[in-house]
Image: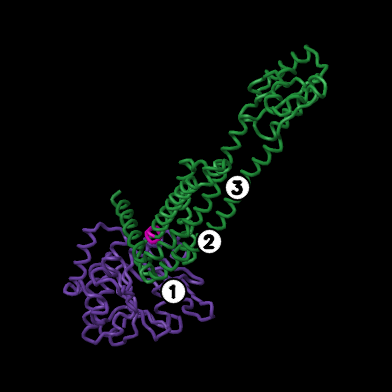
């Protein structure tokens, strides 16, 4: 136990000395990690906000089942029973012809005399179906639409598929863009951190050689390098998260943001705490991976 | 304790450092390894602490085949072997004390134990007035003794020294050899590579003579 504690203390002390032996290089490593995570974070921020918007929109998303003019009361009864037993459907609401017309008149006041002119009430009665959260996606909606399309008394099943797909696509794109660009920058950070580690190893080549010759274990030699890289990565990750938060707050205060509702959609909320923690932890992981690869190349493994 | 069985070492450029060398060294022995420059003395020593591995043949240290030993066990082999390098391998930015204490730190001794052992060995080698000097501030003989102190500080079972008197005047050389004899009398196996024939003659110990990588003589000089 004492031995392990001593080894850990040695590791911490050496890592700390290593970090301060060349502060500029340490800062360079941390900055490289920070930049890659900041950019990744920006895209994640966009994705989080868009995703939230999609969810909010989805709450209003309904499937409308328009009925034939000649649908019989028995048809309506059968349909209602079927909807109510469908686990994907949360709320079933029947909208009679008269209500459909009222709704039109309310939504489009300037066209309120249109129904009169075309002769009577052209609006069909319908069932409005509210879909359960888990099934608010294009595939599930498609399935629901298909299963009732051919039911007796049904004229047409409609839902706004285009919108949903485009939004879900946009979220995926933001996420993929973030991952792609983030990966690219993470690779650049890996190379930078790796080069810094290699420089440090090179500067201490003699010392490391002697350590090996007098019987230092590999862990004893590498530990300080790995710990220093992890600390740099964690610091870089924390700076990235702080930078993202500042960016978010600044965007929130701009005039464009307060006057343009679209901005609320793309930047209204910050990353959840787990995502922020994951970014910082990702920085540490990036540092460690870079150090391992670089120590391996420098021949200390 | 140390056994060489038909050890051959070829380097990639085609040079043959050792060819078919067999030797047995008992625990507690004092051995001279001799021969002209390039005879394979340094390679022979490097095989023992696994700084080099044979192309063919076997090197056994403490009943372990050194060449096939897993990498994680190498540090523990080396902790039993003190090596005095021909070029000393001292760290220029560490003091005399730090250079020696470094070896005790690496094997995980407590701070207190590190200090005790380092002071002891530096006193034994007459370096206790040089503790805070840097290698470049001390004489060649003192650097030599620093290297020996570092090799001894972990109380090795085997001491290897490569030309330890190479750049010392005869008086100092004699003093250092006396020290090795002392260490040997406490049970440490000592192997000294040297081409200094006078030294060997004076000491009258077992000699393994190498030439062009072959054992040409093994006798008490």
Mark 3 lies on residue:
A174
Circles 1 and 2 on the same subunit? no
Element type at mark 2: helix
Residue A252 percent coordinates (x, y): 49, 45
Secondary structure found at label 1: strand
State the image coordinates of residue A179 (x, y, percent, origin top left). Answer: 58, 51
Name the one closer to the observer, B24 or A299: A299
Residue A246 lies, with reference to residue A198, above or below; the image says above
> Residue sitting at 79 percent across and 21 percent down?
A116
| Chain colored purple | B
Image mark 1: chain:
B
Residue at point 34% right, 69% down? B26
For marks 1 and 3, give the CA distance. Answer: 70 Å
Asked whether B35 or B42 is in front, the reply is: B42
Residue designated by label 1: B22
Q: Is residue B191 visible?
A: no
- Residue B42 location (% of width, % of height): 40, 78
Quarter of the figure with the N terminus of chain B: bottom left
Q: Is residue A127 left or right of residue B1?
A: right
Q: Are marks 2 and 3 in contact (CB under 8 Å)?
A: no
Dominant secondary structure (helix, strand or loop) of the stretch shown in magenta: helix
Tell me the green chain. Answer: A
* Nearest to N terminus: mark 2 or mark 3: 3
Q: Residue A188 shows which numbered tag?
A: 2
Assess disc 1: are there few (<14), some (14-19) or many (≥20) residues with their C-alpha within 10 Å of its C-alpha. some
Hey, which quadrant is residue B144 in on the image?
bottom left
Residue at 52% over, 41% down: A268
């Amino acid at each position: 136990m004492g031995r392990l504690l001593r080894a850990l203390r040695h590791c911490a002390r050496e890592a700390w000395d290593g970090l301060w032996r060349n502060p500029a290089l340490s800062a360079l490593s941390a900055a490289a990690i920070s930049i890659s995570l900041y950019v990744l974070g920006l895209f994640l921020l966009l994705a989080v906000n868009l995703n939230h918007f999609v969810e909010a929109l989805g709450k209003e998303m309904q499937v409308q089942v328009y009925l034939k003019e000649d649908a019989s009361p028995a048809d309506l009864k059968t349909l209602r029973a079927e909807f109510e037993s469908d686990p994907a459907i949360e709320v079933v609401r029947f909208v009679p012809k008269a209500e459909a017309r009222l709704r039109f008149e309310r939504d489009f006041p300037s066209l309120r005399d249109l129904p009169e002119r075309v002769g009577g009430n052209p609006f069909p009665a319908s069932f409005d179906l509210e879909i359960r959260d888990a099934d608010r996606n294009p595939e599930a909606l498609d399935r629901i639409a298909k299963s009732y399309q051919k039911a007796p008394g049904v004229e047409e099943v409609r839902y706004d598929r285009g919108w949903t797909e485009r939004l879900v696509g946009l979220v995926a794109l933001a996420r993929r863009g973030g991952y792609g660009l983030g990966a690219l920058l993470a690779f650049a950070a890996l190379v930078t951190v790796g080069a810094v580690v290699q420089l440090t190893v090179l500067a201490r080549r003699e010392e490391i050689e002697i350590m090996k010759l007098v019987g230092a274990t590999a862990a004893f030699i590498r530990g300080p390098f790995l710990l220093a890289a992890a600390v740099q990565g964690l610091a870089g990750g924390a700076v990235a998260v702080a930078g993202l938060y500042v960016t978010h707050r600044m965007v929130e205060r701009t005039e464009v943001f307060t006057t343009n509702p679209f901005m609320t959609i793309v930047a209204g909320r910050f990353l959840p705490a787990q995502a922020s923690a994951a970014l910082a932890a990702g920085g540490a992981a990036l540092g460690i991976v870079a150090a391992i690869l670089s120590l391996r190349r420098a021949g200390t493994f | 304790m140390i056994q060489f069985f038909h050890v051959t070492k070829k380097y990639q450029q085609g040079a043959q450092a050792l060819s078919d060398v067999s030797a047995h060294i008992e625990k507690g022995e004092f051995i001279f390894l001799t021969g002209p420059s390039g005879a394979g003395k340094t390679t022979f020593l490097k095989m023992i602490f696994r700084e080099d591995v044979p192309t063919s043949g076997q090197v056994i240290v403490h009943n372990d085949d050194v060449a096939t030993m897993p990498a994680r066990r190498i540090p523990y082999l080396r902790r039993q072997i003190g090596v005095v390098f021909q070029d000393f391998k001292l760290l220029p930015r560490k003091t005399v004390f730090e250079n020696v204490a470094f070896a005790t730190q690496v094997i995980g001794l407590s701070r207190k134990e590190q200090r005790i052992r380092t002071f002891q060995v530096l006193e034994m080698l007459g370096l206790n007035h040089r503790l805070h000097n840097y290698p470049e501030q001390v004489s060649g003989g003192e650097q030599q003794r620093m290297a020996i102190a570092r090799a001894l500080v972990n109380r090795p079972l085997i001491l290897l020294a490569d030309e330890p008197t190479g750049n010392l005047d005869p008086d100092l050389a004699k003093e250092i050899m006396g020290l090795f004899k002392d260490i040997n009398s406490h049970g440490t196996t000592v192997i000294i590579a040297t081409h200094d024939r006078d030294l060997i003659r004076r000491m009258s110990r077992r000699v393994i003579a190498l030439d062009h990588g072959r054992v040409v003589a093994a006798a008490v000089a």
